[in-house]
Amino acid sequence: MTDLKDSPFASPGYFNMDQSEAVVNARAAGCTDARLSQIVSSVTRHLHALVKEVQPTIEEWAAAIDFLTRTGQMCSDWRQEYILLSDVLGVSMLVDAINSPAGAQTTESTVLGPFHVANAPARAMGDNICLDGVGTPILVEGRVLDEDGQPVEAAELDVWQANGEGFYDVQQQDLQPPMNLRGVFRTQADGHFWFLTVAPKHYAIPHDGPVGQLLLALGRHPNRPAHIHFIVKGPGLETVTTHLFVEGDPYLQSDAVFGVKDSLIASYVTVDDAQAAKTFGLANPFSKLQWEFRLKLRPKRADKADPTKDGN
Ligand code: BEZ
Ligand code: FE
């Protein structure tokens, strides 16, 4: 008969305060998925340390379970309250920092957020993505380059933003036309792109659920500084999910989701040029946001082994 002590499930003993983590983790000794085992044992270690530090009452523990339950119940096809929780606790930006370390001269990434819509319409260069004419018109103009400074032809820029009152089209389906302030552009041979839109405004993240209640209880506001979202892709290049923030916004220093990076703050330039205004169909003078995206080169894959060789 197998001695229990030799079983992979052998426990250091009964559960107690001193060896709580060791007892729980020993129970999973039979796990064959090394990464899962690493993650769950780390979760157990940190959770047990947290509980020992905080010493919750039974009522507090029940309130935590209730908070997580309500967070799950708030989720639907169009609302992801757990990602929002991750965002406001800085976890989304931490995962972003780990997976997209800042390159020397390349565009930094930031949170995707819940308002991206797949399959936004392709737009022609210079199109106006503001479909309802509400807001202060601006020109956004720039180039997509690779990390060596070479212009990228046919780079794709998937753009979306809130309107001048701080709402995305999907939040105001009865007020804004579908696909308002969204579109996909492709750069010219010299990496250039430009489009018309309206100045975005700062806005509050969805805060009518448990995450909003948490922010309120913590004395935190739910606001994000004004920004335009971009997902920029190019052949042979790493895709970057990023924003352009606007200099002078009152919430740059206190973004509810910690998404601001110094390198992503742009300034409006006033262009006083009647000819240019006429070309773009804007009143003179007009405001412009100018930006260069620099994308990392995708590492080349090692050539696959030649299957005709036996490898000896
Ligand atoms: C956004 O920028 O659209 C966003 C990001 C994180 C949470 C909520 C909104
Ligand atoms: Fe946003």
Image (cartoon, rainbow, N blue to C red):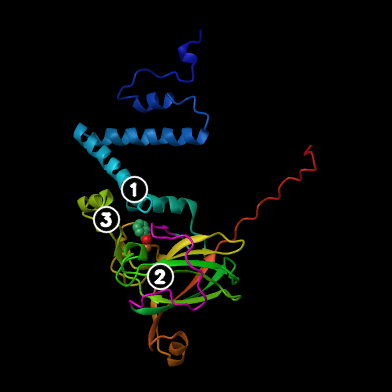
CB atoms of marks 2 and 3 within 8 Å: no
Looking at the picture, how far across and down is residue 107, in whole percent?
49, 64
Residue positioned 28% across, 32% down in the render:
52
Q: Is residue 258 visible?
A: no
Which type of secondary structure does the marked residue at label 3 adopt? Answer: loop
Which type of secondary structure does the marked residue at label 1 adopt? Answer: loop
Which type of secondary structure does the marked residue at label 2 adopt? Answer: loop
CA gap between label 1 and label 2 equals 25 Å
CA gap between label 2 and label 3 equals 22 Å
Front residue of this view, candidates 283 and 293: 283
Amino acid of disc 2: Leu
Amino acid of disc 1: Cys
Write down the quadrant of residue 131 in the picture. Answer: bottom left
Front residue of this view, candidates 157 and 72: 72
- In the image, which disc is placed on residue 181? 2
Q: Earlier in the sequence, mark 1 or mark 2?
A: 1
- In the image, which disc is placed on residue 75? 1
Vertical order, 199 against 37 (above or below): below
Task: Give the residues in magenta.
Answer: 110-135
